[in-house]
Image (tube, rainbow, N blue to C red):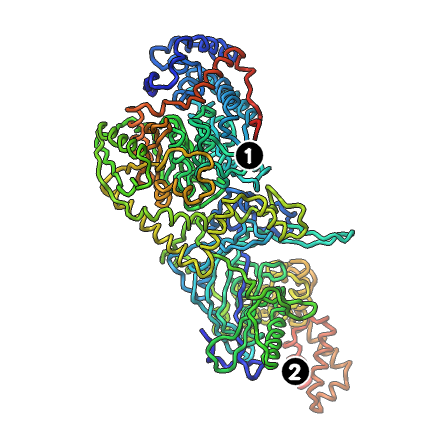
Amino acid sequence: MTGTHHAGTSPATDYEVVIGLEVHAQVVTESKMFCGCSSRYSGAPPNTLVCPVCLGMPGSLPVMNRTAVEATIITALALNCEIPEFSKFDRKNYNYPDLMKGYQISQFDLPFSQAGWLEFDDPANPGQMRRAGITRVHLEEDTATLKHVRDSSGETYSLMDVNRAGVPLMEIVGDPDLRTADEAGSYLRAVRQILRYLGVSTANMDEGAFRCDANVSLRPWGQAEYGAKVEVKNMNSFRSVVRAIEFEIVRQRDLLDAGGRIVQETRGWVDDRAITVTQRSKEAAHDYRYFPEPDLPPIITPEAEVERLRSLLPELPDAKRQRFADAYRMTSDIADTLTQTRALAEYFEQTVNLSGNARAAANWITRDVLRILGATGAEIDQILLTPAHLADLIKLLDTGTISGRTAPEVLEEAVSTGSMPREIVQQRGLGQVSDTDALTTAVADAIASNPKAVADYRAGKATAMGFLVGAVMKATRGKGNPGLVNELLKQQLDG
Amino acid sequence: MHGTLSPLSSRKGDGARGGAFCPAIAAHGMLGEFGLMGAPGQPAGHTRHMHVTREHLVGISGDLTALTAPEARDLLVRRQISATELAHAVLGQIERTESQVRSFITVTADEALAQARAADVALGGSDPGATPPLTGIPVALKDLFCTTGVQTTAGSRILEGFIPPYDATVVARLRAAGAVFVGKANMDEFAMGSSTENSGYHPTHNPWDVSRVPGGSSGGSAAAVSAGQAILSLGTDTGGSIRQPASLCSVTGLKPTYGRVSRYGVVAFASSLDQVGPFSIGVEGSAMVLQAIAGADPMDATTAPFAVPDYRSTIRDGVKGLRIGVPAEYFTAGMEPDVERLVREAIQTLTSLGATVHPVSLPYSEHGLATYYIIAPAEASSNLSRYNGIKYGLAALDEVDMTRAMDATRQRGFGNEPKRRIMLGTYALSSGYYDAYYRKAQQVRTLIKADFDNAFASVDVIAAPVSPTVAFKMGARIDDPLAMYLSDVCTIPVNVAGLPGISVPCGFDHQGLPVGLQLIGKAFDEATLFRAAFAYEEATSFHRQRPPLAEQAGSEGSVNQAAMGAGKAGGPQRAPHA
């Protein structure tokens, strides 16, 4: 895909910006890609999750982690890729201390998948989608981590932790179909959302479970061939991805405008200085000398296996968003919000199932539940307020047992204690007063003690009614059924 | 009942027959110390008529180092000898011959004696016949099999001091089979070579003529068995590294089918070609070892899931009706006349036993060497990348910069041959050259394999020479890599095709230097190779001939041992020069 048909919004008026992203995502598995060591290295003491295989000891051999392969193929299917029947692992040869074997087991010319696509929100046209090609999704292994240290005496040295070496790493290579930094950000969010929907990766960038390199080039509008490509690395947040691309576009445009020439190279993003700097020129680029990994037999994925994996695909964000909008008659904004994560969408649907009130469920979740999550930093499945709690609250409201005024108090209580709203209402006597006799007295008292409001009402001032209702509610400590109070007030005033 | 015995008269050095009974008696006396004699129901003399006895086997010289593995098993199970006694015998033989042969990088005498004592405990139980099949049998391991707690160098200085925390699968399986490990055998560095002169430690000498090479790369393993320094040994064969030294040292050596034996824990040279196999005196010993080590391994994804047949159950089935293919292409111009003559005589012997001979054609084998010298260095250039001093072995600690330290380690640690092959392989895989070299080599590989498939449609085994020449003088080819590479011209196509091949002694040239017959089998049909090779050795006696050096040292040893008593004859922890 060349993307020349897209009306890009390049900040450089004379150039078309061409961006392709390479995303690395650690695959969630129990064990590493090629050995039995745990891949849950977060928080583990250095070099404790290691064995001869992931240490690259002499004579050790890799054995494939089938779960990681399946996760990769499932991801590729979610990204609309073709799954070839025959694929294989290759060795990518280069030397660096964090690479235990002197080569990385990766996939070169016959990866698990190819030729897919992904739709993402068009940042230039809210509500519209853009589509970018997915070149391939393949599987490889992560490296060890190096820490460069300077001790108190000023001596510098490097420390190596091999725990991460061999953790399965999925690479999602995108076609050069993106045209702005914001598109890159939107694309990246869509990729992350799908990975999380599938549960194949935590896709947390700050933990290093999700990494992005950007290939950025400029070419004069209408030119068919691409300009020299610059690969930008070292971005450790979504924001820095967008900023690095923005910087790179400007840098390249300025250089071209000044009559300069872009050299193909790898540049690193320096976050605190907000610039990219040269890391490696094309001349110094690695020749990875790929060749088929002789220690692993090729992988045959028959059509039936592809279909089995396809059947495991959950409903994906786009489909879910569309269904929510249609089935629950909600705006696309609300649908979008409710489908941000699979867990939130499930929370919503469970609440709807238990309460029978989709509109109320959507309102409570988008307004209150998300506020609570934002304030506590908790995940939806970590809070005490379950769909059952929320549905209970909605039913209390729908049956008139409590008023809309009391509901927030009940909600807060449920959130902090995990008690069911029904029990909270009972224990704290928050039940709404719908008893006409009890309210009649309160209404009469309100009329008697607020002659000015009564006069205003009779003079036709609409606000006066609100004041009187408020007085009754105050007298009943908020438990009066607002509809009934209104009705009784009208009866007595108009009667 | 096993134990049909080859006539002892065929051995060299039978002149010692006259006074030979004494050491045997003395040895019996020693056995008493281990409490293995006179066990109830097992009086020493009782089985004399039913079984081969100690006197038959070793009585002539009293030399236990001349035993084949099945003979040793028989004597151990019937408590005619003890494992400790056998361990002392081979360790003594190492002590006496190692300064001339230099088969070992590390001799593990203490471990061997500890394992032997454990074997004796097992053999002293109520049912010694139920002990694992290699219980108490001394085995030498090529120094590229990872051994827990014992230095493993792959013949390279870059791995000096590397002590693996794990056993190779084959080592673990031999351990489970009761084997006694006597040491780590010398080899060409990273198995790259055909003479064992490329060892980063010292060259190994051919026991038949110590001015000549033992072949390689498993030269230490072959020489050790030939010299009686071990009853069995384990090597690897990537392009002929078991069969060629077996041929040059006159022992049996088997390269199994690729995927038959696990490569886990075997320091890799060329991953798509490397295969582990045994050396033995006599075919049956190799069958016993393969039985113990073969079969799928969850740690090696390239092992085949096929069941392992009982090799010894068919080994005596003979060759009547066996169709033997003879490829004209393997009798090449550069072949020594004696080698060709002896190999053709061997084929004739097989036909006299009932086999039939059929010409076959393997035209693409001509390109085997060229193919191999692309694929093997390519894989090696990648396999050897891990040796950078960061994690184990040699480290250039004087270099401060991380990258420079890695480079310096490799510069100092690798010898010339690994460096040569790393460069060859790196070049062959380089961008722009891959298609012309590596890809083309893989295509030719397919054609070489197709030739064999074609031939095996009409024959059961293929007979060929192993090495075009007998053992050459040390130093003769060391400065001429191409001449060295040509040593493997008849063995390499077998690796390229992934097939099994065996080398069996088939005579001696006019100088008295050994020649081997190569039998090549269908994939996973080692059983037929054993059967044919066994029939051949039963009809001949070449395998029973020992190098004079071993014979002499063995008889000295048996006298010494008899005089000293077995308990005091411990070998050195390390060979004096290791």
Query: Which residue has dot 1 on it?
Result: B148
Q: Given the image, what chain letter belongs to the residue carrying mark 2?
A: A
* Relative horizontal placement of residue B398, taking residue B355 as reference (left or right): right
- How far across and how far down the image is residue A268, in percent? 62, 66
Element class at badge 2: helix
Number of residues whose C-alpha sits closer than 10 Å to that of mark 1, classed few (under 14), some (14–19) or many (20 or more): some
- How far across and how far down the image is residue A195, in percent? 52, 62
Q: Nearer the viewer, mark 2 or mark 1?
A: 1
* Relative horizontal placement of residue B358, taking residue B27 as reference (left or right): left
In the image shown, does B39 or B221 lie closer to the viewer? B221
Say if B121 sits above or below B505 in the image.
Answer: above
- How far across and how far down the image is residue A157, in percent? 69, 51
Marking on residue A491: 2
**Location of the N terminus of chain B (image quadrant):** top left
Say if A126 sits above or below A136 in the image.
Answer: below
Toward which corner of the image does residue B250 lie, by quadrant? top left
In the image shown, does A262 or A224 lie closer to the viewer? A262
